[in-house]
Image (cartoon, grey):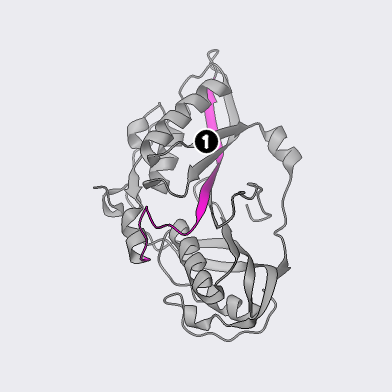
Amino acid sequence: MNSVEHSPLGKSSEYIATYSPELLFPIPRAAKWAELGLSAETLPYRGVDYWNCFELSWLLPSGKPVVAIGEFAIPADSPNIIESKSFKLYLNSLNQSVFATAQALVEVLEQDLSATAGKPVTVRVRSLDEAAREGLNALPGSCIDDLDVSISNYAAPQPELLDCDPTQIVEQRLHSHLLKSNCPVTGQPDWGSVVVEYRGAALDPASLLAYLVSFRQHADFHEQCVERIFLDLQQCLQPEYLTVYARYVRRGGLDINPYRTTLAEMPANRRLVRQ
């Protein structure tokens, strides 16, 4: 079974510029699910991990290069995540590879990424003009970042900081740009913005902010951070519905944006000002 210790993450890697699908490295989700008391059969959410690549390039049959932006939608219940450095190395391997059309490239990407993730991955390739027309997005609801909170322990998430009033049932949309965690292998910081949407016991926004800040030195992957937030809020709020999603700042030309929800509809993949 693949583990992150055997991945290319944090190691020197040769730059390969011709199509090499063998570079993709799957990491099973099962171990991290088990840490949260979950399994593939008991996931309390549905969702997707949106990855965006801002350094996608390939060659036309004439030898002329193309640059574009790639969007990859990986199901949240797929057996594997795709280790981020291997993903980047794989995408780099397209740089000197020939594809007659963008659609031909999409078909290859969907085939390789689906095989690695263990479930169908949807790929969208956008021109720079298309991406520019879509513009930047603003997160929904109220920003809680200016609230006054005190916190001194950043080593691990502290769900005991969450405070709600079960006598009041409310619908709220709250967001923060102060989410930070660290890569569990390299120790590099991962910066993100997070949205919480729910109907349930009235959550004290200041307590949510203190809880999110407690992730600051926590070492985990983006997907597991969002899943932990989802589960802790679900335990606190006992909500009728709950959505938690994060938009992370890119590293190596890739950003990762996990969405977890009890609803059927997925939020749109729209980039923020830091992305």
Q: How many marks?
A: 1
Task: Give the labeled residue for mark 1.
Answer: 122
In the rendered image, is residue 219 in sight? yes
Viewer-proximal residue among 226 and 25: 226
Along the horizontal axis of the image, is 100 left or right of 10?
A: right
| SS class, disc 1 | strand
Single out the residue that lies furthest toward the top: 62
Picture quarter containing residue 173?
Answer: bottom right
Q: Would you say residue 38 sits in the magenta stretch? A: yes
Front residue (pair 148, 200): 200
What's the residue at 57%, 55% (across, down)? 249
Classify 39 as above or below 91: below
**x and y percentages locating residue 186 in the rendered image:** 37, 59
State the residue lying farthest toward the left: 1
Which residue shows up at 72% across the image and 33% down it? 129
Q: Is residue 42 left or right of residue 273?
A: left
Which region is colored magenta? 36-59
Q: Position of residue 57 (x, y in %)?
A: 54, 30
Q: Position of residue 128 (x, y in %)?
A: 67, 34
Q: At which x and y percent is residue 263?
A: 59, 54
Please name the residue shown 56% across and 67% down the image.
179
- Inspect this view and state whether residue 185 appears: no
Q: In the picture shown, does residue 129 fall above or below 171?
A: above
Q: In percent of the image, x 42 and y 36: which residue is there?
A: 113
Q: Are there few (<14), some (14-19), or many (20+) residues within 10 Å of tag 1?
A: some
Residue nearest the observer in this picture, 75 or 124: 75
Residue 266 falls inside the magenta stretch = no
Compared across the picture, whether 21 is left or right of 120 comes to left
**What amino acid is found at the position of numbered circle 1 in the picture?**
Thr
